[in-house]
Image (cartoon, rainbow, N blue to C red):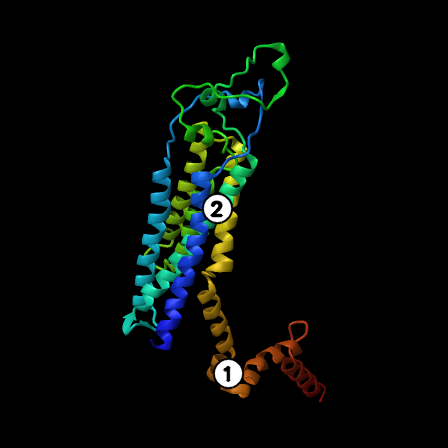
Amino acid sequence: MDRSSKFILRKLIMDFLCLFIVGISVLMFFLFGKPYKRGFFCNDESLYHPYHDSTVTSPMLYVIGLFLPICTIVIGEYLHARHFSGHTAKVLFGYTIPPWLWNAYEKIGVFGFGAACTALSTDIAKYTVGRLRPHFMKVCVPNIDCSLPENQHRYIEQFNCTATGMSARMLKEVRLSFPSGHSSFSAYTMIYLAMYLQLRMRWKGSKLLKHLLQLLCLFMAWFTAMTRISNYKHHWSDVLAGSTLGTINALLVAYCVADLFKEERERHCSTEKHRPADYETETGGVAGIQDELCPLQMRMKSYGGLNANTEDSTQESRRRGSD
């Protein structure tokens, strides 16, 4: 095995191992996690909302949130490689990996790792806080008579759910309100996609098309977050915390992990570095610079709208008149 293949193979193994560790942690929370058992107040009106189905279901969230950015990254890297060269191809076991495919793999890998970290950080908060959802009283129907005076304004921790037809999974989900997982995941995926469009979309046919697509991404995340409130799946503070968490993760992954705009910074630095040399070439070196400064020096000699040459000619005409 050649050195290049060893390096690529080691990188692939390490990348998938890191992604597997974070992904299996999310799966463990989903299968075996037990949320903190928080109590409630009988007079807490925020827990008496009706139960509604989700407008944006979980399969819809994850399919669109993953499929749309991944397809955009693949197309973006392919089109970028057609118009810009400079990347070297990778060789794995004698097979040449196109540069655009390798770049797409790196960006998709980082994006997927960030998505898994967003889901994991959301689950850690969910199972640690154990906040009750707005439809808690409808789904659980606790065996507490809230009409009794002694139960008013009393924090109740010891209770059992008596609702019929409710699965154990639903009774578990009713304690996972904070923060909103839909809001955090949609904010991460759509904000990351908007920043990727800022990096790769360079079509000059329209100035506003790129920004329109970015706005649509933000609207998708915003719509998802708002439906979690209108469907009574979360309190408004849950949605705010989830959207904030997803936004922070998207910015951290884009700027600190993926470093999406590294190429732009390097291109800008190289342009700035060569700009003085190009200027000297155009103006003929130091002599050209001095020539450029000559008009400035002549203007600095002028005073009151008259320059030195004008003053000399005036004095000469006065001497002739006196003679």
| Closer to us: 321 or 100 | 100
Where is residue 64 shown, x and y percent of the image?
A: 34, 44
Where is residue 240 shown, x and y percent of the image?
A: 52, 38
**Quadrant of image for the C terminus:** bottom right
Identified by mark 1, the residue type is: Glu
Residue shown at 46%/62% (left/top)?
Answer: 261
Identified by mark 2, the residue type is: Leu
Where is residue 243 shown, x and y percent of the image?
A: 50, 41
| Closer to us: 319 or 43 | 43
Q: Identify the mark nearer the N-term, 2 or 1.
A: 2
Q: Secondary structure at mark 1?
A: helix
Residue 87 visible to an observer of this rendering:
no
**Quadrant of image for the N terminus:** bottom left
Labels 2, 1: front one: 2
Q: Residue furthest front?
A: 32
Q: Residues within 10 Å of mark 2 (few under 14, many from 20)?
A: many
Where is residue 193 shown, x and y percent of the image?
A: 40, 51
Q: Residue furthest right?
A: 322
Residue shown at 32%/58% (left/top)?
Answer: 74
Q: CA distance from mark 2 to mark 1?
A: 56 Å
In this picture, is 91 found above or below 144? below
In this picture, is 216 found above or below 323? above
Which numbered circle lies on residue 120?
A: 2
Residue identifier under label 1: 280
Side (left or right) of 70 relative to 44 = left
